[in-house]
Image (cartoon, rainbow, N blue to C red):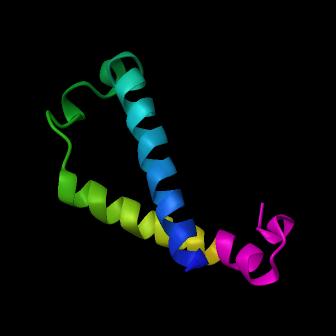
């Protein structure tokens, strides 16, 4: 159960931080440099797949050592 909580927490935090980052910086930072290469709308299936896999990777490779030992400092930094 603790792995599921870690996974969902990671997923929520990553999506929230990325959403805020992209909303605040897309027009000012990416727009002038990338121009027409930016999609008019996000591709949701690709985004969902990315975040699900990313959160799984963080859970397996970062959270798992800390959750197994019970000491948060065991998480790879």
Q: Position of residue 24 (x, y in %)?
A: 40, 22
Q: Which residues lie in the magenta part?
A: 62-77
Instruction: Identify which residue is drawn at 31% across, 22% down.
Output: 31
Quadrant in the picture for the C terminus: bottom right
Based on the displayed image, in which of its 4 quarters is residue 60 positioned?
bottom right
Instruction: Identify which residue is drawn at 18% across, 37% down.
Output: 39
Quadrant in the picture for the N terminus: bottom right
Q: Answer above or below: position of 40 versus 58.
A: above
Left or right: residue 36 versus residue 14 is left
Q: Among all residues in the image, which is located at the extreme front?
A: 1
Q: Tell which of 13 and 36 is nearer to you.
A: 13
Q: Is residue 8 magenta?
A: no
Q: Answer above or below: position of 47 versus 68.
A: above
Instruction: Identify which residue is drawn at 41% across, 69% down.
Output: 53
Q: Position of residue 28 (x, y in %)?
A: 38, 16
Q: Tell which of 49 and 6 is nearer to you.
A: 6
């Amino acid at each position: 159960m603790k792995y599921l909580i870690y996974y969902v927490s990671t997923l929520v935090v990553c999506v929230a931080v990325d959403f805020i980052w992209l909303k605040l910086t897309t027009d000012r930072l990416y727009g002038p440099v990338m121009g027409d290469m930016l999609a008019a709308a996000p591709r949701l299936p690709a985004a969902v797949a990315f975040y699900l896999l990313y959160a799984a990777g963080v859970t397996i490779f970062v959270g798992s050592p800390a959750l197994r030992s019970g000491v948060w400092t065991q998480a790879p930094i």
